Image (cartoon, rainbow, N blue to C red):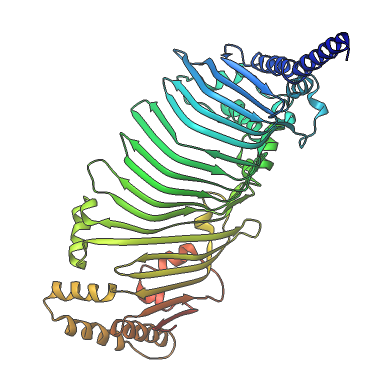
Amino acid sequence: MRPSIVIAAVVVLGFAVGGGYYGLEVFPQRRFRAGLDQALATLPPGTTATYKSAHYSVLLRQAVVTGLAVHGEIPGDPPQPFDVVIDSIETTNPNLGFPDLWAHAVANPASFAPDTALPVADAVAIKGAIVRSAAFNLTEASVQLAKLRLYPWALLHDGMPSWREIQASLKPGSQPPELADLRPIFRAEAAAILGFAYDSYAAGAANIREALPGIDVEYDIREMTGDAFDRGVMRGASLRGITLNDNVVGALAIDRVAMGAVDVREPMTRLIFGDALSASLLNGISIGRIEYSGITARPPGQPAIHVTGFWLGPVAFADGMPVSGELGWTDVRVSKLQVPDPRVWDAFNQLGLETITVSFTLAYDWDVAHQRVSIHDTMLKVDELGTLTVSADLTNIVPNAAGMDQGSLAHLRLRLEDASLVDRLLRMGAASSGADPAAYRALIVGMLRQQPTGAGQGTMIAAAARAAGDFITSPQSLTIELSPPAPIPFIALRGAMMSPVNLATMPGLTVSANEP
């Protein structure tokens, strides 16, 4: 081969390699940095950002920004500066056209539908984030987001508050703010909630400290994870290893928090459209079960309180009211040393208890349109004493302050399952009267069984008394059920409860002992 041909081939190859390098490295690098600089230039007035390096690899489809530093100011008197420092942000398959698409969205926001998303990247990994301010400090080891995307419709909707309006709402005043004054903040939060989505979320160890007037709070979270979130609809999330220290309420540790599905899209959309702040904004909200496991609370100067679990939800809202809900806790262990009231100490001592273990559940459904409330799956349990379960149907329940006075009771069922309560009460009574416990029990049972057995009200009283006597003789369970032929107004019911005789003669009342 002639030397000139070889030299020509080398030159062509050199240009090819150089052009490939430019196409695969130089041009994408420049485009990526230009887009990054363009994005940072759109930060709110008074907020600046810099970075140490920015690199994009076409072959790996990865972009890495290191040493990002943001400085800004929270309005106030005096203003409070804040700083955000992030060691690195790594994105996989980033959308290099995002800056241009966002610029188009800013220029033509009405061209985007509520469900039109701009993808940011397939994956975003943040490492070493620090936020510093006078009132709030955060350190976050790592955050990972999958399929992060933004929705311009919400973020750029016409009439959304400006940064200056948000700052003005945050600025403390001499008087407490009115609800209308907070509207810019709520609308901005609605835009943020409806403006982004991701397929999954995971965060490493975080430390947060808040300093407020008279309060200094610090808490740590070992791990946070989240399922898919899309415009106010979250499938679920969890937190692990939570510890909190407060100079007022003491220390708190929680092993795990699990959150069920949450949907706030409808009310957030109404806020975007400019609806006034009112109870009707609650309509459409649904909150899944939020469960706390392994709780240890240590009030200042007191022994620790242990709670196996606490939960709230599901909760749903309609007609501006919480129309269904559940809450409860399991195994709250309290000792008499934790209750400083001498009367409580006396009750513990007379019952022969040093500690009690309490569990509680409450569940209800409210048909606001038909003014009906159903209380179900409701229970109070004290392991050392017994369990009380309650179910009830209420009518004429209206959503106002007078609702409880206007309401009526359509059905009530109480069931007490005894663990040791009856025996402890009998011992207390015997001790106060100086009687033998067995003789005291027989005396009480005899008095109950000697009730008149005549027709009418006498028969009802005698039946209830006999059931109570059977329960005291062999304390297993006592069931009281009230099914009146017509709902009983609460006012009349409160009057009847002032006298056991009046209560025992109410129509529809039955009392039974030791039945399954």
Q: Quadrant of residue 410?
A: bottom right
* Residue lying at the far front of the rendered structure: 1
Compared with residue 76, is residue 503 higher up or lower down, i.e. above or below? Answer: below
* Residue lying at the far top of the rendered structure: 4
Residue lying at 49% horizontally and 68% vertically, measured from the top left: 391
- Picture coordinates of residue 424 (x, y %)? 23, 73
- Picture coordinates of residue 137 (x, y %)? 43, 25
Between 48 and 192, the one lying in front of the other is 48
The quadrant of the picture occupied by the N terminus is: top right
Is residue 275 visible from the viewing direction of this image?
A: no
Is residue 442 visible from the viewing direction of this image?
A: yes
Residue lying at 70% horizontally and 37% vertically, measured from the top left: 269
Between 13 and 362, the one lying in front of the other is 13
Compared with residue 238, is residue 171 higher up or lower down, i.e. above or below? Answer: above
Q: Is residue 341 left or right of residue 101?
A: left
Residue lying at 58% horizontally and 40% vertically, measured from the top left: 201
Q: Is residue 270 left or right of residue 358?
A: right
Q: Quadrant of residue 148?
A: top right
Q: Is residue 412 left or right of residue 351?
A: right
- Picture coordinates of residue 345 (x, y %)? 19, 57
